[in-house]
Image (cartoon, rainbow, N blue to C red):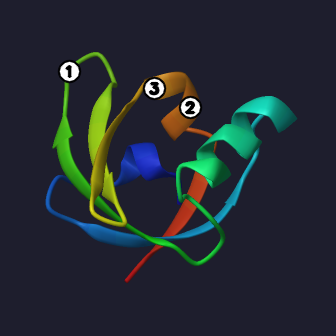
Amino acid sequence: MTLQEGMPGGRYRVQGTALPLGLARRLQALGMTHGCPVQVLRKKRRGAMIIKIRGSRFALGQAVSTRILVEEE
């Protein structure tokens, strides 16, 4: 499943990304690596979401969150 399909309050584990190399490396630098736990804190109507990774909160747009593959924890 993709991160966009996740529900607020849900905890997931990153399986991979289908992002351009530069963006994928940026997310890795921020701590989103393979197997990293992610918690969805909030989802907006237009697809943006706020997630928590390794104690830090990040906002992701729909274009990015639909390309991050996760599994339920």
- Distance in Å between CA atoms under marks 3 and 1: 10 Å
Q: Which residue is mark 1?
A: 45
Q: Quadrant of the C terminus?
A: bottom left
Residue name at image x 39 percent, y 71 percent: 12
The one of 18 and 57 positioned closer to us in this rendering: 57
| Residue 52 occupies quadrant | bottom left
Q: Which residue is mark 3?
A: 62
Determine crowd level at label 1: few under 14, some 14-19, many 20+ residues with C-alpha closer than 10 A. few
Amino acid type, mark 2: Val
Q: Secondary structure at mark 3?
A: helix
Determine crowd level at label 2: few under 14, some 14-19, many 20+ residues with C-alpha closer than 10 A. some
Marks 2 and 1, the one that precedes in the sequence: 1
| Residue 14 occupies quadrant | bottom right
Amino acid type, mark 3: Gln
Determine crowd level at label 3: few under 14, some 14-19, many 20+ residues with C-alpha closer than 10 A. some
Q: Secondary structure at mark 2?
A: helix
Residue name at image x 34 percent, y 24 percent: 47
Q: How many marks?
A: 3
Pinpoint residue 46: horizontal percent, then vertical percent: 29, 16
- Distance in Å between CA atoms under marks 2 and 3: 5 Å
Amino acid type, mark 1: Arg
In this rendering, position of residue 69 left or right of residue 10: right
Residue name at image x 20 percent, y 20 percent: 45
Pinpoint residue 51: horizontal percent, then vertical percent: 30, 48
Above or below 36: residue 58? above
Dots 2, 3 in contact, CB < 8 A: yes
Above or below 37: residue 41? above
Q: Which residue is mark 2?
A: 64
Toward the front, the furthest residue is: 29
Pinpoint residue 66: horizontal percent, then vertical percent: 55, 38
